[in-house]
Image (cartoon, rainbow, N blue to C red):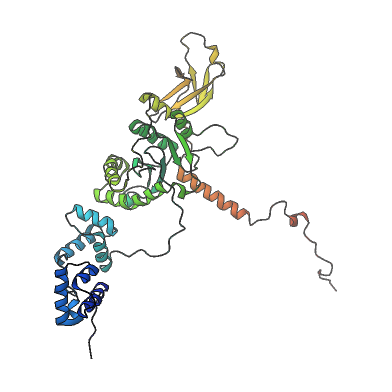
Amino acid sequence: MQGHIEMSGKEVRRLEVLRQVADGVITQRQAAEKLGLCDRQVRRLLRRYERQGAAGLVSRKRGKPSNRRIHQAVKDAILWEVKARYADFGPTLAAEYLAGDGYKVSKETLRRWMTEAGLWQPVSGRRGRVHPPRPRRARQGELIQIDGSLHAWFEDRGERCALIAFIDDATSRVMLARFVPVESTQAYLALLEEYVSLDERPVAFYSDRHSIFTQHDPEDAEPTQFERATRALGIATLQALTPQAKGRVERLFKTLQDRLVKAMRLAGISDIETANAWLPEYLAQHNARFAVAPQEADDAHLPFAGSSEELARLCAIHHRRRLSKDLVISFRRQRYIVQTGGAPRYALRGQQIDVITYRDGRIELWHGKEKLPFKVFDPAQDVPAPVDDKSLTARVDALVKARRWSDKSRPAPHHPWRRYPAPSPSADSQAVNP
């Protein structure tokens, strides 16, 4: 009984060609051309075939350990390091951190080791609905996607907070990111001021349709604070109808919720102040790893010609008030009296002015391009600030939507069955006493 010989497709091909040489069908040079080998290699294979038959063409390395295999002691040290420090890391991220620790191992080799050790479960299952990709903008600065993510960024070491990020559509480069307690108008305006002061003005911002970014009341023509600031800076604003439309910033948060959280854990960061001071260093590494080159080298950012004071004023909160005939306005339960310096200012009576509140608590009154001196008449009072939290309004909207759906199960007031009175008991149904 003859035994079986296991051969690869390449070895079977060699066997067929060498049989033709042995039978005199083709020459050794023709065989070398077919196999892509030199004449000397063909002669050597032919001698092995004549001595051992088909078994002589099987690779002698089969079944033997590779000369490039990683030593078992090194493998054990790597797995120990993974268990000790990177137990919940994916193979790709763990391989990057191990390279920084001096262990050079490919992500696929580490994936196989982690799977064998029970440290990694291969991801399986169906993908969600596939959305067609949107082409990138050609130049950096043409479109900046902005959004925030409320997440346990510090895990159980600190409070939940939000990360607001500005990412360039052309390059996937994170232009700016900051941790803030909540997503609010003030937080976005602060990042807008910082972005313009650092990288000048982009052509457009791309955001969702939250009330921070756009007005939803058709009867209210007044823009939101963010819209007012971007219009004054000459920056267009676009709103996405679905999360998939601004997929670049959505995927960024998915990446950061894995990589950034683990990086801050290893760095021992557990508060917003420390995280914001350390974040630029991390973003430089992130951009070096994930950013791509734009299609065109020209930068689309435009210069901002104003001063830092003007930029701070544009990115502050503006309130509109109307002056009385005595040049007095009421703001936060206090009366503000415009000082005229003894000169009559009758033209200001009944005029609308801007009450500008800065993040540091300063208040200024402006009429057009003129800054008005004023005096506060009443003592300061504790006035509760309006709720400005994107996550809170999202939860309220969800509750309202759920309430609307529950109300749909109840018949409307004009439903036909409500038009008729309830039937009275019939005489036959009434009990008759004997």
The answer to whether residue 83 is visible is yes
State which quadrant residue 95 falls in. bottom left
Residue 251, given in percent of the width and then of the height, sits at 39, 50
Measured along the vertical axis of the image, is residue 217 above or below residue 242? above
Residue 311 on image: x %, y %: 39, 27
Question: Which residue is nearer to you in this view: 356 or 315?
Answer: 315
Please state the horizontal and vertical placement of residue 37, each as a whole percent of the image.
Answer: 19, 67
- Would residue 284 appear left or right of 395 to someone viewing this image? left
Quadrant containing the N terminus in the rendered view: bottom left
Report which quarter residue 308 is drawn in.
top left
- In the rendered image, the quadrant that contains the C terminus is bottom right
Q: Image point 58% across, 34% down: which residue?
A: 220
* Left or right side of 259 for 391: right
| Depth order, front residue of 343/231 | 231
Q: Nearer the viewer, residue 342 or 208?
A: 208
Q: Residue furthest bottom?
A: 1
Rendered view: 43 above or below 88:
below
* Whether residue 60 can be seen here: no
Task: Give me the residue at 57% from left, 38% from top.
Answer: 217
- Height in image: 238 above or below 333? below
Q: Which one is nearer the viewer's eye here, 334 or 273? A: 273
Residue 203 versus residue 23 in the image, above or below: above
